[in-house]
Image: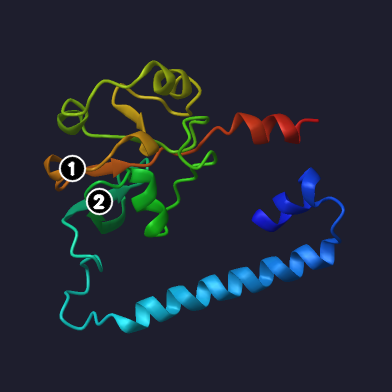
Amino acid sequence: MWCRLLKASSPFSSISSSTITSQCTKFLSTTNFRAIQRISQRSFSDQPLNSTHDNQKTIVLTFTDSKKEFVKEVQAEIGKSILEIAHANNIDLEGACEGSLACSTCHVILPKEFYDKLPEPTDEENDMLDLAFGLSETSRLGCQIILNEEMEGMKVTLPSGTRNIQVESLQTK
């Protein structure tokens, strides 16, 4: 993605696409190599299989589908959003705007007892929730819910569908 952005940027418009692609590939290869090096230098043999690698506190979250059928139980790092946890665990929660509060595709439904413990949604979040598919009284955006210890054992329900206004409007043209 960054390589495509560089190609489109005006200061780089005089540089050939192949040069930019080549440099981006080298950078990404070096970055990935460094990440692999850091990981290989740490030993995880003393840690339980479900723990995080940085000894962060975790809680258990259970994801269910719209029919309340089990999808996956995960160890969720405190301080992360539900959207981040879903993506890290290959759970189908879109998040088209990558957590920037510009869509409703990370809409989730929470149990009332957990919903009531959360701070009130902001006006911006409520505006996006108005666009969400399958809205309920305990709906929130997964990108706006930062996990804490009080959320231990929470069941997060994924709605039966999402509504991505930007993609839908592009497809109708």
In front here: 31 or 158?
31
Amino acid tagged 2: Thr
Q: Secondary structure at mark 2?
A: strand
Query: Can residue 1 be seen by looking at this rendering?
Result: no
Amino acid tagged 1: Asn
Question: What is the x, y in percent for residue 34?
Answer: 47, 76
Please determine whether, in this image, residue 141 is positioned above or below residue 6.
above
In front here: 135 or 107?
107
Label 1 Cα crowd, 10 Å radius (few <14 / some 14-19 / many 20+): some
Left or right: 54, with 15 as reference point: left
What label does residue 148 carry, if any? 1
The residue carrying mark 2 is 62
Please determine whether, in this image, residue 72 is positioned above or below residue 143.
below
Label 2 Cα crowd, 10 Å radius (few <14 / some 14-19 / many 20+): some
Q: Residue at x 72, y 52 (%)?
A: 6
Please determine whether, in this image, residue 70 is positioned above or below residue 111.
below
